[in-house]
Image: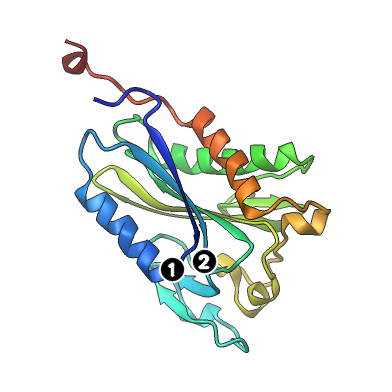
Amino acid sequence: MIDGSGLRVKRLGLTRYAPALEAMKRFTATRNADTPDEIWLLEHPSVFTLGLAGNPAHLLQNPGGIPLERVDRGGQMTYHGPGQLVAYLLIDLSRRRIKVREFVCLMEEAAIATLAEYGLDAARKPGAPGVYIDGAKIAALGLRVKNGCSYHGLALNVNVDLAPFSWINPCGYADLKSTRLADFGIHDDVDAVGSRLFGHFQCLLPSIAITAAETA
């Protein structure tokens, strides 16, 4: 049995995208009712990713020869690279009694609260999941849920090179500007920002539901 604090963090450093995706799938496929939820904090080498219903035409140019990975999350195209904090959320939503839409809002709220610690006023944008500062996107969301359990998650720009975002329509939106913490004079590294983000997930995620049978 797992109590309400059943949440583990793993810091994976710079990890290639394809092995990370396969590890998430494997974790989700083999977990059971007693498997603790995990949040993986990492960075990826440069890669474009395209969601299930994504349109490859959103890759406008690719002067850097960055690889493109088709993936099994929702959403369109985004970029990952060193200096971007990626948080993969391996959460049993059914056990925590949280709906997918609520979980998406929770992800956004964790990012907004993290940015508020740095004195930044971030917000949601209606109809465009993610987190924005003055209309520029600083955090992107992508999710997959299987058997009530989530994987993929959230990417927050810390000091990532923003040039590759200009080579795509980020998340399918033409001319969408991207920004990062470094643009606001904030010099914390990915690990430091990850610690703050994880703390907010600890606070925001509903406690694990304990059934009458488990307490008997």
Q: Which residue type does callout 2 highlight?
A: His
Mark 1 secondary-structure assignment: helix
| Quarter holding residue 190 | bottom right
Q: Which corner quadrant of the image does residue 34 belong to? A: top left
Q: Measure how far apart labels 1 and 2 are at the Cα level.
A: 6 Å
Residue underneath mark 2: 44
143 or 91: nearer the eye?
91
Picture coordinates of residue 39, whole percent (x, y):
44, 45
- Eyeballing the image, is 71 above or below 39? below
Residue 214, compared with residue 183, is above or below; it is: above
> In the drawing, does residue 48 fall left or right of residue 121?
left
- Looking at this view, is 37 or 164 the one in front? 37
Q: Residue 17, labelled with which disc?
A: 1
* Tags 1 and 2 touching, CB below 8 Å: yes
Outermost residue on the top side: it is: 216
Q: Position of residue 109 (x, y in %)?
A: 59, 38
30 or 124, nearer to the observer: 30
